[in-house]
């Protein structure tokens, strides 16, 4: 199994508070991703990183920011959490062979915004 | 925009039955992947199919990539309760520059003993 951890695993917060989720990998993979998973929507890409300090937006990036200061860590920040950001968040990593992009996922963080 | 549509959305069967789930698109994909996700966990990669017409087997699971590389199917023989989970297909989005994945919404399978 790929070495990917996410913290925290569960979090309950209030509307308007900042929240940071952490993804840590021990595989030294270049690419890291943040997804959210919601009923009826499947997995949607929030942001991704293709190297240290290299990040870009995904399909649903509004209200989220990311940072990657080290290869092994990718942080997702909700600057001011809203109830619509209640979701399960997954981090994934890949070595990205161009036509494949086989991804390995972390265990997820369940976030509830009250 | 490339889209992947999965069917059925939900499937509930008895142990020992066979089933097929489908992943369809109007776009050509260079490869398609299948993942399985169990409740409370992240998706786990099962297989990648690359060549049109390719068939891959993983124990009781058979994966097929369509000849035109626009669709794929997953067939499970003699389903077991351990096969219960959400099955997701995914393909590389060539609309972007970084080869990100597009995911279908999944088929939720329940196998009852």
Image (cartoon, rainbow, N blue to C red):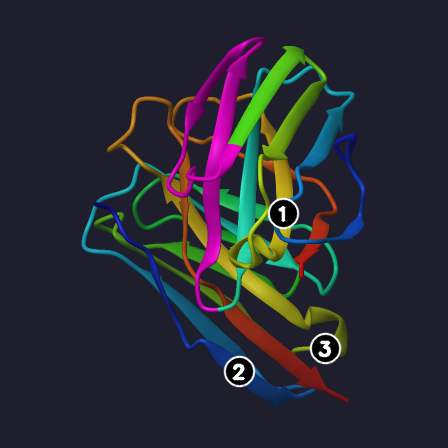
Tags 1 and 2 touching, CB below 8 Å:
no
Location of the C terminus of chain B (image quadrant):
bottom right
Residue assigned mark 3: B80
- The chain containing the residue under callout 1 comes to A
Quarter of the image holding residue B31? top left
Is disc 2 placed on a helix, strand or loop?
A: strand
Tell whether position A18 is magenta: no
Q: Is circle 3 on the same chain as circle 1?
A: no
Region of the chain picked out in magenta, as a range: A40-64
Q: At 37% from the left edge and 23% from the top edge, which residue is drawn? A: B98
Pinpoint residue A94: horizontal percent, then vertical percent: 57, 27
Location of the N terminus of chain B (image quadrant):
top left
- The chain containing the residue under callout 3 comes to B
Residue assigned mark 1: A89
Pinpoint residue B100: horizontal percent, then vertical percent: 41, 32
How many marks the image carries: the answer is 3
Is disc 3 placed on a helix, strand or loop?
A: loop
Q: At 37% from the left edge and 28% from the top edge, which residue is drawn? A: B99
A61 or B59, nearer to the observer: A61
Quarter of the image holding residue B94? top left
Query: What is the CA distance from the residue labelled 3 to the residue labelled 2?
Result: 13 Å
State the mark number for residue B11: 2
Q: Main secondary structure of the magenta part?
A: strand
Mark 2 surroundings within 10 Å by alpha-carbon count, few (fewer than 14), some (14 through 19), many (20 or more): some
């Amino acid at each position: 199994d790929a070495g990917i951890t996410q913290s925290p695993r569960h979090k309950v917060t209030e509307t308007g508070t900042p929240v940071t989720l952490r993804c840590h990998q021990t595989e030294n993979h270049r690419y890291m991703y943040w997804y959210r998973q919601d009923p009826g929507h499947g997995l949607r890409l929030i942001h991704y990183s293709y190297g240290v300090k290299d990040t870009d937006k995904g399909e649903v990036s509004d209200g989220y920011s990311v940072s990657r200061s080290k290869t092994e860590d990718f942080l997702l920040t909700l600057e001011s959490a809203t109830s619509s950001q209640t979701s399960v968040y997954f981090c994934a990593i890949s070595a990205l062979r161009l036509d494949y992009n086989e991804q390995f996922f972390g265990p997820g963080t369940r976030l509830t915004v009250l | 925009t490339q889209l992947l549509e999965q069917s059925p959305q939900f499937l509930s069967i008895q142990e020992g039955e066979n089933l097929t789930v489908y992943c369809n698109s109007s776009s050509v994909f260079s490869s398609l992947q299948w993942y399985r996700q169990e409740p409370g966990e992240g998706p786990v990669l099962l297989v990648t199919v690359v060549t049109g017409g390719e068939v891959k087997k993983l124990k009781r699971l058979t994966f097929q990539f369509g000849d035109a590389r626009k669709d794929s199917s997953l067939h499970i023989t003699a389903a077991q309760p351990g096969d219960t989970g959400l099955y997701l297909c995914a393909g590389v989005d060539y609309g972007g520059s970084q080869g990100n994945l597009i995911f279908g919404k999944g088929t939720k399978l329940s196998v009852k003993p």
